[in-house]
Image: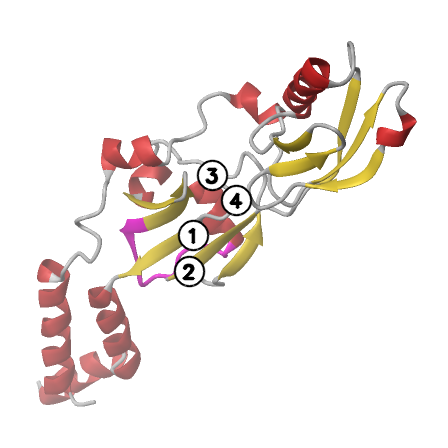
Amino acid sequence: MNLSKAVTALAISLCLAGCESHLYDHLPADQAAYKIIPPIEDKASLTKYEITPGDELTYAVAEEPDMKVEKMIVDDGGYIQVPLAGSIRVGGLTTAEAKRQIEAVLGARFIKYPNVTINLTTPTPRLVSIEGEVTQPGSYPITRDTSLLGALALARSPTNKARLGEVVIFRTIDGKRMVARFNVTRIRTGNDPDPQVLNGDVVMVGLSHAKSIYRDVLQAAPLFNVFATLRYQN
């Protein structure tokens, strides 16, 4: 690439840096974004495991050996099939809360003062999908205290072409697809809280077209060559 083409390309890239379109500008941001996808506020709540679809449970009722179930899988709707009690929704509950709910159903219909034992044996993997301008896009296992910055670290961080002010999280809430936009630069500096990432979330890191063009120009016409050309012309 000769000097005139390099300068022209650089000028175009600088123009794009000032006027490039913001693809996600219409999406909820700032306080509106945190209402949809909040940060972790109650650290103590992280110790309370909530049952989720795909979890495997064991179930038993004291003095009722025929009601014991060694493997009970939570279905996609968060329900389990309980002997005598039928279909019981336990998704989003702790095992202690599920125990009380089942005892209430059994006690009202079949067994006087039932004593239920329900334990989590195999939790389902919790995954987040990270796409866009990150070093290693893909699906990654997360824990209950994984934040947006933690999720990006799993994907080896954003690339140098990433638009950090346009990092979007997609989440399904009550059957509806919700989306919110976050500014990772502000989160990194502590100006904004770090939102919590949950199982099933999709994180999309936007591309800065100006940075992309600028980098391509530098790779095609290294500054050393440009300076050499200028010196030769002088």
Q: Position of residue 110 (x, y in %)?
A: 75, 18
Task: Single out the mark in the foreground, 3 or 4.
Answer: 4
- Residue 190 shown in magenta: no
Q: Is residue 139 above or below residue 88?
A: below
Q: Residue at x 22, y 67 (%)?
A: 209
Amino acid of disc 4? Asn
Q: Residue at x 58, y 34 (%)?
A: 91
Q: Please give the residue where the numbered disc 4 appears in the rendered image.
A: 199
Amino acid of disc 3? Ser
Q: Please give the residue where the numbered disc 1 appears in the rendered image.
A: 202
Most foreground residue, 115 or 230: 115
Please rate how many residues cluster around mark 4, counting C-alpha atoms within 10 Å: few if below 14, some from 14 to 19, many from 20: many
Task: Give SS at disc 3.
Answer: loop
For the residues labelled 2 and 1, say whether their Cβ atoms are less than 8 Å apart: yes
Q: Please give the residue where the numbered disc 2 appears in the rendered image.
A: 131
**Gap in Å between the C-alphas at discs 3 and 1?**
13 Å
Task: Give SS at disc 4.
Answer: loop
- Residue 165 shown in magenta: yes
Lower position in the chain sequence, tag 3 or tag 1: 3
Please rate how many residues cluster around mark 1, counting C-alpha atoms within 10 Å: few if below 14, some from 14 to 19, many from 20: many
Task: Give SS at disc 1.
Answer: strand
Q: Residue at x 23, y 77 (%)?
A: 217
Lower position in the chain sequence, tag 2 or tag 4: 2
Q: Please give the residue where the numbered disc 3 appears in the rendered image.
A: 147
Q: Residue furthest top?
A: 113
Please rate how many residues cluster around mark 2, counting C-alpha atoms within 10 Å: few if below 14, some from 14 to 19, many from 20: many
Q: Residue at x 85, y 31 (%)?
A: 68
Lower position in the chain sequence, tag 3 or tag 4: 3
- Rendered-image quadrant of the N terminus: bottom left
Most foreground residue, 16 or 59: 59
Task: Give SS at disc 2.
Answer: strand
